[in-house]
C-alpha cells in the first residue's frame, strides 16, 4: 500500500462517526477482572459512517447552499497497513477504549474521537465472547 493510501485510510479511521446514541453499558461477565487487558477475536468490525447527499436538483445549488441530508452507512473497518477487514481483534480493559489488532501485527485505536463508543464495542465483544465460549478469553500474561 502506498503512503498516500495508508494516510487516507488512517484519516477515515480517525473520522469514524457514531450514528445514534451510545449503546447502554452491558453487565460485566462473571469472572471479569476490571484491571486485566483482554483480547477478543471479532472478525470483521463494521463501523457507521455518514454520507452527505445533496437534496437539491442541482449539485452546484446544493453545494452553494449547504443543503444536504445525512445518511448513515455501515462498512467494514480495514487495517491501514495491509487493508484486511477480516480476522481483527479488539483489545483493552473493561470500560476503556478498544485497540484494534490486525493479523499483520498493526494496532490502532478504534474510533479515537469517540472513546466511550469504542469502549462499549469492546465490552459488547467481551460479553458476546463469554456467552459463546462459556467464559472470558484468558488475559495475556503481564509483562
Image: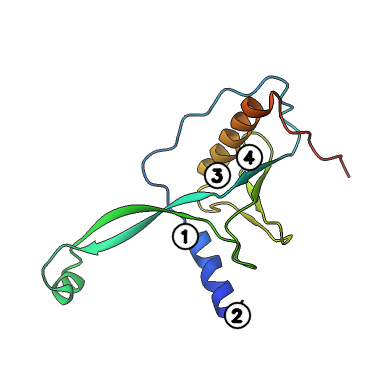
Task: Check contact, mark 2 vs mark 4: CB within 8 A.
Answer: no
Disc number at residue 2? 2
Q: Which residue is mark 4?
A: 96
Residue assigned mark 1: 15
Q: Earlier in the sequence, mark 4 or mark 3?
A: 4
Relative horizontal placement of residue 113, taking residue 104 as reference (left or right): left
Mark 3 falls on what kind of element? helix
Which SS class for mark 4?
loop
How far is the residue under mark 4 from the one under mark 1? Answer: 19 Å
> Of marks 2 and 4, which one's residue comes earlier in the chain?
2
Whichever of labels 1 and 2 marks the residue nearer the N terminus, that label is 2
How many residues crowd around disc 2 within 10 Å: few (fewer than 14), some, or many (20 or more)? Answer: few
Badge 4 crowding class, 10 Å Cα cut-off, few under 14, some 14 to 19, many 20 or more, is some
| Nearest to the observer: residue 87 or residue 138 | 87
Q: Nearer the viewer, mark 2 or mark 3?
A: 2
Q: In the visual, does 36 lie left or right of 52?
A: right
Q: Secondary structure at mark 1?
A: loop
Question: Which numbered dot is residue 73?
Answer: none
Residue named by callout 3: 118
Position of 124 relative to 101 (above/below)? above
* Residue situated furthest left in the rendering: 57
Q: Residue at x 36, y 53 (%)?
A: 73
Task: Identify the residue at image location x=74%, y=39%.
Answer: 37
Disc 2 from disc 4: Cα separation? 32 Å
**Which image quarter holds the C terminus?**
top right
Give how far apart the Cα atoms at labels 4 and 3 are.
8 Å
Identify the mark nearer the N-term, 3 or 1.
Answer: 1
Q: Where 77 sits versus 57, above or below?
A: above
Task: Give the quadrant of residue 95.
Answer: top right
Amino acid at each position: 500500500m502506498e503512503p498516500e493510501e495508508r494516510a487516507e485510510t488512517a484519516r477515515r479511521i480517525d473520522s469514524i462517526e457514531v450514528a445514534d446514541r451510545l449503546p447502554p453499558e452491558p453487565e460485566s461477565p462473571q469472572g471479569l477482572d476490571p484491571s486485566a487487558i483482554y483480547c477478543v477475536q471479532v472478525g470483521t468490525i463494521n463501523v457507521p459512517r455518514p454520507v452527505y447527499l445533496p437534496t437539491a436538483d442541482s449539485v452546484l445549488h446544493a453545494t452553494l447552499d449547504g443543503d444536504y441530508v445525512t445518511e448513515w452507512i455501515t462498512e467494514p473497518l480495514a487495517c491501514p497497513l495491509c487493508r484486511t477487514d477480516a480476522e481483527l481483534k479488539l483489545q483493552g480493559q473493561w470500560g476503556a477504549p478498544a485497540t484494534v489488532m490486525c493479523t499483520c501485527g498493526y494496532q490502532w485505536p478504534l474510533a479515537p474521537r469517540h472513546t466511550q463508543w469504542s469502549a462499549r464495542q469492546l465490552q459488547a465483544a467481551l460479553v458476546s465472547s463469554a456467552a459463546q465460549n462459556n467464559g472470558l478469553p484468558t488475559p495475556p500474561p503481564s509483562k
